């Protein structure tokens, strides 16, 4: 699948289903191991980490901030759909899930493809961690991966959310797409990230 774009109108459900089905045979655009995707090798590494709230010390509560944030992360609900809307089969296992990310910029809509390549769900005496990372597929405007990580400190009860991206512009895309990405891409990424923390914090702390 090549990158798809439109101006001012959405894709139909049938079009999105067909586009998702076409991703099954699409390969990851990431050819290097994650630990080698560092700034000195030409990759941009950015992200942020912020607190979401507190719950009682110890392991996560069944419906506490950690559990609510985990559900929102699995549903990609932290993404502001006014900036990036995720399209995927919510019944599919998280690991290996194909996703179409619909980016909206100045009336333009772009569809980019990625796949969940790794999931972490672990705990020790000090901390519980949950998260997942997706890798870009060949039709994405970027190459790289992005981690979304949730943690709870068992001693303090603090719940934190972290986003970490390793990326570079894809050389597979046409020159005009790469030029447009350089012009507005970083600004959109930063705005999306700020909103992701705000949305997840709201979802975690809103009255039940």
Image (cartoon, helix red, strand yellow):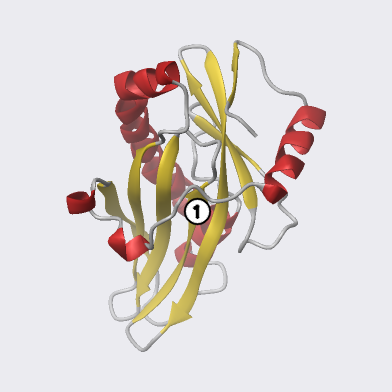
- Of 101 and 145, which appears nearest the observer? 145
Q: In this view, does 21 lie to the left or right of 70?
A: right
| Residue neighbourhood size for the residue with mark 1, other residues' Cα within 10 Å, grouped as few (<14), some (14–19), many (≥20) | many
Residue 197 percent location from the top left of the image:
37, 45
Residue 114 percent location from the top left of the image:
55, 46
In the rendered image, the quadrant that contains the C terminus is bottom right
Residue 80 percent location from the top left of the image:
49, 34
| Residue 133 vertical placement versus 87 (above, below) | below
Q: Quadrant of residue 38?
A: bottom left
State the residue lying farthest toward the bottom: 125
- Of 159 and 85, which appears nearest the observer? 85
| Residue 166 vertical placement versus 94 (above, below) | above
| Residue 130 vertical placement versus 43 (above, below) | below
Q: In this view, does 14 lie to the left or right of 99?
A: right
State the residue lying farthest toward the left: 40
Q: In this view, does 205 lie to the left or right of 77?
A: left
Picture mark count: 1
Q: In this view, does 12 lie to the left or right of 194?
A: right
**Residue at numbered disc 1:** 134
Residue 150 percent location from the top left of the image:
41, 63
Q: Is residue 114 visible?
A: yes
Q: Residue at x 24, y 46 (%)?
A: 42
Callout 1 secondary element = strand
In the rendered image, the quadrant that contains the N terminus is top right
- Of 107 and 156, which appears nearest the observer? 107
Q: Is residue 208 visible?
A: no
Q: Which residue is drawn at 54% across and 51% down?
A: 28
């Amino acid at each position: 699948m090549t990158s798809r774009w439109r101006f001012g109108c959405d894709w139909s459900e049938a079009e999105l289903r067909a586009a998702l089905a076409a991703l099954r045979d699409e390969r990851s655009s990431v050819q290097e191991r994650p630990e080698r995707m560092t700034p000195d090798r030409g990759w941009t590494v950015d992200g942020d980490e912020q607190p979401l709230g507190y719950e009682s010390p110890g392991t996560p509560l069944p419906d506490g901030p950690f559990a609510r944030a985990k559900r929102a992360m699995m549903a990609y609900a932290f993404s502001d759909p006014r900036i990036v809307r995720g399209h995927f089969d919510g019944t599919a296992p998280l690991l290996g899930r194909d996703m179409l990310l619909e980016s909206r910029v100045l009336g333009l809509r772009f569809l980019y493809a990625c796949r969940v390549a790794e999931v972490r769900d672990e705990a020790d005496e000090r901390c519980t961690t949950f998260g997942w990372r997706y890798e870009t597929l060949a039709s994405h405007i970027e190459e790289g991966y992005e981690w979304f990580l949730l943690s709870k400190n068992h001693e303090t009860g603090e719940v934190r959310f972290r986003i970490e991206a390793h990326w570079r512009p894809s050389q597979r895309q046409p020159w005009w797409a790469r030029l447009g990405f350089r012009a507005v891409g970083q600004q959109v990424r930063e705005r999306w990230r700020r909103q992701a923390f705000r949305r997840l914090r709201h979802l975690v702390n809103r009255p039940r």
